[in-house]
Image (cartoon, grey):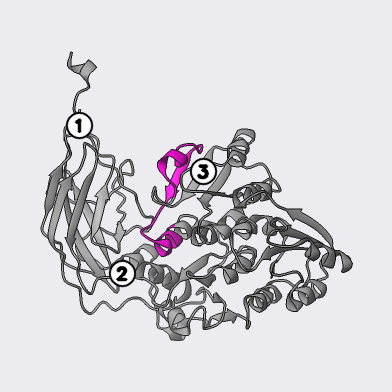
């Protein structure tokens, strides 16, 4: 019987395997479109204000003329509001922000202008004090507070306001980018966002799993974010991963891209949460994803956004930017309309080595290439044919993006040889291959019972 191939954690963006074919040109063929210059693209629309509260109002004013409902979240921290977007979508409600013992004037005026009749406050009185309830009630607005004893319990309380699901989305409650990536998708599907810690399952989450007939769970993040012992407790669990929050963001929205009714996209800073909290409800209302960016968006982000924004025909999308230039720079947005420069390839990695560290794990290392943005790792069982393929996924090519210069391959069979080679990537251009390295996992030591 042939040995089973090794497992490794996949990304979602598929590309051609041909050596040194640039990712962006493969996507051109996949989508059968030609990319244009910025002259063909619609201008981005920035929704921003002087403060996060003003930005929230700017987003709401662009999305809603009137609403019977609104969601009120704490503007100075993220956990309680991360799971609120599906509830906002259920009631076609905007998300507004508050802080302190009184509503910000801009928030209060917006509630009045929208003729809001009911407000859901997300979080306990430790973050949004009861004085806010009283202030809303004095405005003839009814108040429903949704709160648990911690962020994980609050997310479950929000989930209980939605229809009983068959699918759920699970993200870390210890950071915000993964939840922001998934919020428009969960909102459109009307499925809850469950927050969990890395290494234990809260009782409220266990109870929720017990009382609902859930058959599929999408877990965002690898075992370093949510470990396997927790992952394995969810029914039908599937990971959506990426080497960092920007890769995970693109992998999440690429997986569910057919849900989005618009070619428009929204853009939010990957280093801040407040603007995208309100933007999550706006994005779901408009049927578009949230793309997270930094000052120099990586090539895989640009590949996705160019397909949406910069087509030489009438179906090119529009970018909606959450926050001012101090949050998302104009230069960062400009990157999203163009593909990386392919004039010069980087150096190939050198001194690649592979080492077996157990009967199932192999690590590889190489010298860092000074001008590389990230690396691709290729695998082979015979040293001749290299495929970055996923076990059980046929010959579907999926690159592993790595910003560092080492990688660990898990879950191999014992006494199993794997060959590797690596390329570096700069501005979307792939280098020549490194030399091949290989290692054989250690042989399993028989137990005392087996040897008798």
Q: Where is residue 316 in the image (x, y as percent from the top left)?
A: 50, 75
Residue sitting at x 25%, y 41%: 6
Q: Single out the residue that lies furthest toward the bottom.
A: 39
Q: Mark 2 points at which residue?
A: 25
Q: Which of marks 3 and 1 is in front?
A: 3
Separation of marks 3 and 2 at Cα, in angstroms: 33 Å
Residue 205 magenta: no
Q: Where is residue 195 in the image (x, y as percent from the top left)?
A: 56, 50
Q: Mark 3 points at which residue?
A: 217
Q: Mark 1 points at which residue?
A: 2
- The answer to whether one can see residue 305 in this image is yes
For the record, the magenta segment spans 226-251
Query: Image quadrant for the C terminus?
Result: top left
For label 2, the SS is: helix
Residue sitting at x 45%, y 72%: 293
Residue sitting at x 67%, y 50%: 158
Separation of marks 3 and 1 at Cα, in angstroms: 31 Å
Residues marked 3 and 2 touching at CB (< 8 Å): no
Q: Earlier in the sequence, mark 1 or mark 2?
A: 1
Q: Residues within 10 Å of mark 2 (few under 14, many from 20)?
A: some
**Where is 76 relative to 388, above or below?**
below
Q: Earlier in the sequence, mark 3 or mark 2?
A: 2
Separation of marks 1 and 2 at Cα, in angstroms: 36 Å
Question: Quick check: 448 left or right of 339?
Answer: left
For label 3, the SS is: strand
């Amino acid at each position: 019987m042939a040995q089973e191939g090794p497992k490794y954690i996949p990304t979602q963006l598929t590309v051609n395997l041909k050596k040194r074919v640039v990712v962006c040109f493969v996507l051109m063929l996949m989508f059968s479109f030609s990319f244009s210059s910025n002259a063909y693209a619609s201008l981005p629309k920035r929704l921003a204000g002087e403060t996060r509260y003003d930005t929230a109002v700017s987003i709401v004013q662009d999305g809603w003329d009137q609403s019977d409902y609104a969601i009120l979240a704490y503007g100075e921290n993220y956990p309680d509001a991360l799971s609120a977007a599906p509830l906002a979508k259920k009631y076609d409600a905007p998300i507004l922000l508050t802080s302190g013992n009184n509503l910000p004037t801009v928030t209060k005026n917006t509630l009045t202008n929208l003729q809001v009749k009911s407000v859901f406050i997300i979080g306990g009185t430790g973050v949004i004090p009861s004085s806010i309830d009283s202030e809303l009630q004095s405005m003839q607005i009814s108040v429903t507070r949704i709160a648990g004893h911690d962020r994980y319990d609050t997310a479950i309380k929000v989930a209980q306001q939605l229809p009983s699901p068959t699918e759920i989305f699970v993200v870390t409650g210890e950071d915000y980018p993964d939840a922001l990536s998934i919020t428009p998708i969960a909102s459109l599907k009307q499925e809850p966002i469950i927050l969990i810690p890395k290494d234990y399952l809260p009782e409220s989450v266990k109870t929720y799993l017990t009382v609902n007939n859930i058959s599929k769970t999408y877990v965002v993040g690898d075992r370093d974010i949510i470990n396997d012992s927790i992952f394995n407790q969810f029914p039908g669990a599937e990971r959506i991963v990426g080497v960092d929050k920007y890769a995970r963001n693109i992998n999440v929205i690429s997986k569910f891209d057919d849900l989005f009714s618009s070619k428009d996209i929204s853009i939010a800073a990957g280093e801040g949460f407040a603007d995208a909290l309100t933007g999550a409800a706006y994005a779901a209302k408009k049927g578009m994803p949230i793309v997270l960016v930094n000052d120099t968006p990586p090539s895989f982000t640009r590949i996705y956004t160019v397909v949406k924004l910069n087509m030489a025909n009438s179906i090119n999308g529009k970018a909606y930017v959450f926050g001012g230039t101090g949050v998302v720079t104009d230069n960062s947005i400009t990157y999203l309309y163009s593909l990386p420069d392919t004039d010069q390839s980087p150096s190939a990695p050198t001194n690649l080595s592979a080492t077996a560290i157990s009967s199932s794990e192999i690590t590889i290392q190489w010298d860092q290439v000074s001008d590389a943005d990230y690396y691709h790792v290729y695998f082979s069982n015979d040293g001749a044919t290299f495929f970055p393929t996923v076990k059980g996924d046929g010959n579907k090519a999926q690159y592993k993006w790595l910003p560092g210069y080492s990688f660990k391959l898990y879950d191999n069979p014992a006494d199993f040889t794997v060959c590797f080679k690596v390329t570096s990537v700069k501005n979307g251009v792939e280098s020549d291959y490194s030399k091949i390295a290989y290692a054989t996992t250690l042989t399993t030591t028989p137990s005392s019972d087996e040897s008798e």
